[in-house]
Amino acid sequence: MEESMEEEEGGSYEAMMDDQNHNNWEAAVDGFRQPPPPPSAIPAPAREPPGGPLLAVPAVSVDRKGPKEGLQLGPPPPESNGVIMMVKSCDAAAAAAAAKAVPAPNPSSTININTSTSKFLMNVITIEDYKSTYWPKLDGAIDQLLTQSPGDYIPISYEQIYSCVYKCVCQQHSEQMYSDLIKKITNHLERVSKELQASPPDLYIERFNIALGQYMGALQSIVPLFIYMNKFYIETKLNRDLKDDLIKLFTEHVAEKHIYSLMPLLLEAQSTPFQVTPSTMANIVKGLYTLRPEWVQMAPTLFSKFIPNILPPAVESELSEYAAQDQKLQRELIQNGFMRGDQSRKRAGDELAYNSSSACASSRGYR
């Protein structure tokens, strides 16, 4: 009886010791095992890096009762055992592979940037380039336009000249180009004025008409060629117009110097019919009115014959005076050989042809 009780007490003591040792062993294992992270803390699988796929290492688990764990992609535990060292080495290898996969900066891209920058710098027009390359082209074209006769063809490229003006304006040479243009035309007009001063009286009117018509015709080509400079420099910064400036140059350097010599000759030519052709007289009078309308006061009667509404409206009390002027003009025409109703210069066959055609027309009308 006592022996059986001692055996039962000894067996229960051994079972109690086994349970205590088992609990101590599980507590030791729990110290080495990392608790599983919550589901919300597990990061989403990252995109595969260019260096190669990431190496996954299965998590260490010794607890058979714990939940089954899959591939652990989170950071390894702080303990330095063999498995953790292998994960670190795999991460280092993956980082090195990703670094190799990143393309190195291509030196050709830097070369292309430098090349484009150098090309841009090469397109810059310096003041020396303007004076040596661009303005000589414009100077030669202006010379040809100023000296050509109306209706003549000159072999210049309007597209090339316009391109030169456009490039110079874009490179901030508008002020210099405008100054050179004014200086160029001023020198030309001064030479024209000296030539007119040396002209004899019988050729003075005709040469003034040629100079005026030639200059006005040249402006019809010069102003469109410099329209880009006119739009973005003269109108914007100077508040003027290129055509008005160039007309003013002719007024100051030619017309003002010769108006007091030209007007008496025009009045004398008016009193003598056909001493000057009507087209020449009309061109000069209209040109002077365009240059300076105030000059009408010097000879209002002369200007009124070519420009309407110069004189005041006619009144009934002056009708007799107008009739006297017409009679005077008719007498002057008769004195110069123009007879009223003179049919001597008519061809003989004209009247016959006229009478026959009239007869045919009347006969057709009668029928």
Image (tube, rainbow, N blue to C red):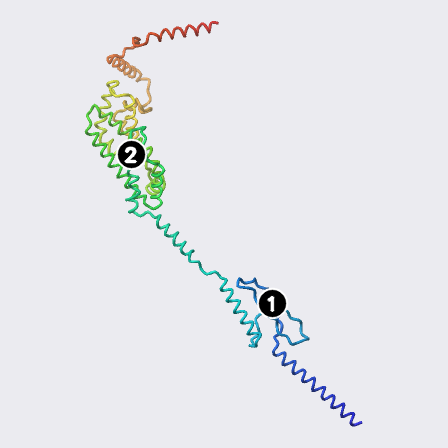
Q: Secondary structure at mark 2?
A: helix
Give percent across and percent down for residue 4: 78, 92
Q: Amino acid at mark 2?
A: Gln
Give percent across and percent down for residue 364: 46, 6
Left or right: 297 in relation to 349:
left
Q: In the rendered view, would you say 68 is above or below 273?
A: below
Distance of label 1 from label 2 (alpha carbons): 86 Å
Instruction: Name the residue beneath numbered marker 1.
Output: 42
Which residue does the image show at 80% across and 94% down from the upper left? Answer: 1
Residue 306 occupies quadrant: top left
Give percent across and percent down for residue 307: 32, 24
Q: Amino acid at mark 1?
A: Ile
Give percent across and percent down for residue 98: 51, 64
- Tell me whether the residue at label 1 lies in contact with that at label 2, contact meaning CB atoms closer than 8 angstroms: no
Which residue does the image show at 56% across and 74% down from the upper left? Answer: 84
* Residue 30's disc number: none
